[in-house]
Image (cartoon, rainbow, N blue to C red):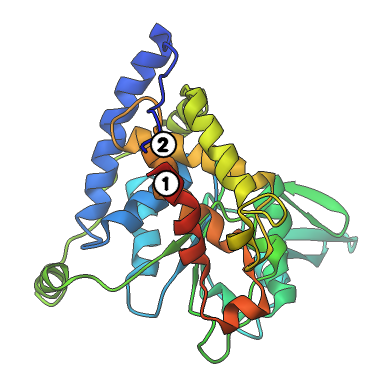
Amino acid sequence: MSAPEAVPTSLDDAVAQQAERALDKLAGARAAVEAVILGQGAVVEETLATVLSGGHGLLVGVPGLAKTKLVETLAVVLGLASQRIQFTPDLMPSDILGSEVLDETPDHKRAFRFVQGPIFTQLLMADEINRASPRTQSALLQAMQEQHVTVAGQRYDLPRPFHVLATQNPLEQEGTYPLPEAQLDRFLMQIDVGYPDRAAERRILLDTTGDAQSKPKQAMSVEDLAAAQRLVRRLPVGETVLDAILDLVRSARPGEGDPAIMRHVAWGPGPRAAQALMLATRARALLDGRLAPSINDVVALAEPVLKHRMALTFAARADGETISGLVKKLTARFS
């Protein structure tokens, strides 16, 4: 039985006018990204929804699927200052945050000066984040949650907006380290990047092997993005959608969900998952030209929001269960 759609409360005139402007800008931005990133419509949508929600995204897939190119394209299209960090086993936290150096003035006085690291940007691409050690990965924790870093006891605020889009190779590959659970929880979505279909791969071959390739074009400014992010938080959410989010997240926790499903789950998502799903469904609706989310948005975003916030028991892994399969079972009740 299908759940009823959300019935949004009325938007005031000011928000309605903001929404009209934002819808045009976002449609242009999405088209500009998809003109360069071919055959990955769902990935583009989820990544844009992550940024619109003010969050961070984890792009997971094998090498060669344009994950890095997607982040570079987004920086241009959204008009964001960007930096890239290539994570390697010998990368140190100071290579990300920055460090203090000892300066000497002409009168021979010495003082420490903080030299900012690449994290001081609006869009940080953490390339192959799971190639670095857990100690280095954890250097991003404070920045991702609190929008500032602390070095030698001093606080340094990061630019606004601040987003981390990290790429990750599958954990089965050699030379990778699993991300700590606390860091995974700070990613609003885990966006799985799969292989393109045949038609899309044909377009990729024609577009990228000639003498002229598609180049990203700016479609939004930082001010446009900030306005859209504020609008996302003002969009109304119907009671049915709110209840669906709560029911879904709570049913993914051991001791609260269906015992037949939860016996496979070692630990489940916390309140941050519900917050992420609430924002992401609003952002997806806006990208789709709607001014309120529906239950379909909740179902569509359940897997990228929940899968990195859940863990299987050893017995479930031995039986061949997957987090994706369990999330599909949890969302089946809303279909």
Look at the numbered disc 1 and give the secondary structure of its residue: helix
Q: What percent of the width, then of the height, locates residue 311?
A: 64, 68
Identify which amino acid the numbered label 2 is placed on: Ile
Q: Is residue 222 among the parts visible in the rendering? A: no
Q: What percent of the width, then of the height, locates residue 78?
A: 37, 45
Q: In which image quadrant can residue 212 be found?
A: bottom left
Q: In which image quadrant can residue 130 be found?
A: bottom right
Instruction: Classify mark 1: residues with Cα within 10 Å, few (<14), some (14-19) or many (20+).
Output: many
Label 2, label 1: how far apart the Cα atoms are: 6 Å
Instruction: Classify mark 2: residues with Cα within 10 Å, few (<14), some (14-19) or many (20+).
Output: many
On the picture, is 7 further left or further right than 134? left
Q: What percent of the width, then of the height, locates residue 166?
A: 51, 65
Q: In which image quadrant can residue 65 be found?
A: bottom left
On the picture, is 234 further left or further right than 112? left
Identify which amino acid the numbered label 1 is placed on: Val
Q: Is residue 214 among the parts visible in the rendering? A: yes
- Quarter of the figure that contains the C terminus: top left
Name the residue: 36% across, 33% down: 286
Of residues 66 and 274, which is closer to you in this image?
A: 274
Name the residue: 59% across, 62% down: 260
Q: Which mark is residue 299?
A: 1
Q: Which residue is mark 2?
A: 295
- Quarter of the figure that contains the N terminus: top left
On the picture, is 77 further left or further right than 120? left
Name the residue: 34% across, 28% down: 22
Point out the residue furthest to the top here.
Answer: 13
Q: What percent of the width, then of the height, locates residue 272?
A: 65, 46
Image position of 334 with respect to 305: above or below: above
Look at the numbered disc 2 and give the secondary structure of its residue: helix
Assess whether mark 1 and mark 2 are in contact (beta carbons under 8 angstroms).
yes
